[in-house]
Image (spheres, grey):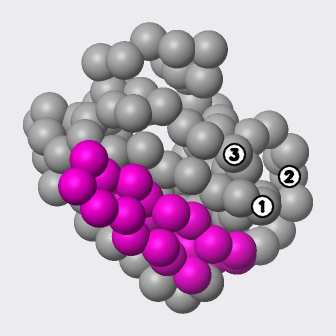
Amino acid sequence: MNLSKINLLHKFDLFQEQWTPKIVAELNGQQVKLAKVEGDFVWHSHENEDELFYIVKGELSLEFRDREVRLQEGEMLVVPRGVEHRPVAEKECWILLFEPGETKHTGEVESALTKNDQDWI
């Protein structure tokens, strides 16, 4: 049993890659991931998984086909399964993701940004 605390800000200092989630914890089949993002991601959805976005630093827009939701530090949004979305960050943004371990990074969409393997930090 691992009862060590996790300092999220320290974990963010351990990587620089954009759009490359890093796993920091796992519970009940769900993974807690950190990512640094900037620019536009790809339009995608997750057929069977909800996805939580929590903004640690900066701002993130989640674009949907019919609207846009802007998130700022301390705010979060759960994107329901099957809902097509595209994250966009004008400047670097640090996000915490909470989603099932089997969730594919870009859903069923394959792009240059797709990461099939995600590292633990």
Residue ranking furthest to the front? 66
Instruction: Give the x, y percent position of residue 43.
Output: 39, 33
Residue 51 relative to residue 97: left or right:
left
Instruction: Give the x, y percent position of residue 16.
Output: 86, 45
- Measure the C-alpha gap from mark 2 to mark 3: 21 Å
Q: Residues within 10 Å of mark 1 (few under 14, many from 20)?
A: few
- Secondary structure predominantly adopted by residues drawn in magenta: strand
Residue ranking furthest to the bottom? 74
Mark 2, secondary structure of its residue:
loop
Q: Residue at x 85, y 52 (%)?
A: 14
Q: Are marks 3 and 1 in contact (CB under 8 Å)?
A: no
Which is in the foreground here, disc 2 or disc 3? 3
Q: Residue at x 53, y 20 (%)?
A: 114
> Residue 14's mark?
2
Of pointers 2 and 1, the one earlier in the residue sequence:
2
Q: Residue at x 48, y 31 (%)?
A: 42
Q: Is residue 92 above or below residue 22?
A: below
Instruction: Give the x, y percent position of residue 111.
Output: 52, 14
Residue 85 in the magenta stretch? The answer is no
User: What residue would you read off at disc 1?
Assistant: 91
- Measure the C-alpha gap from mark 3 to mark 1: 7 Å
Mark 1, secondary structure of its residue:
strand
Which corner quadrant of the image does residue 74 belong to? bottom right
Give the amino acid at mark 1.
Lys
Whether residue 92 is visible here, answered yes or no, is yes
User: What residue would you read off at disc 3?
Assistant: 39
- Residue range corresponding to the magenta coloring: 49-72
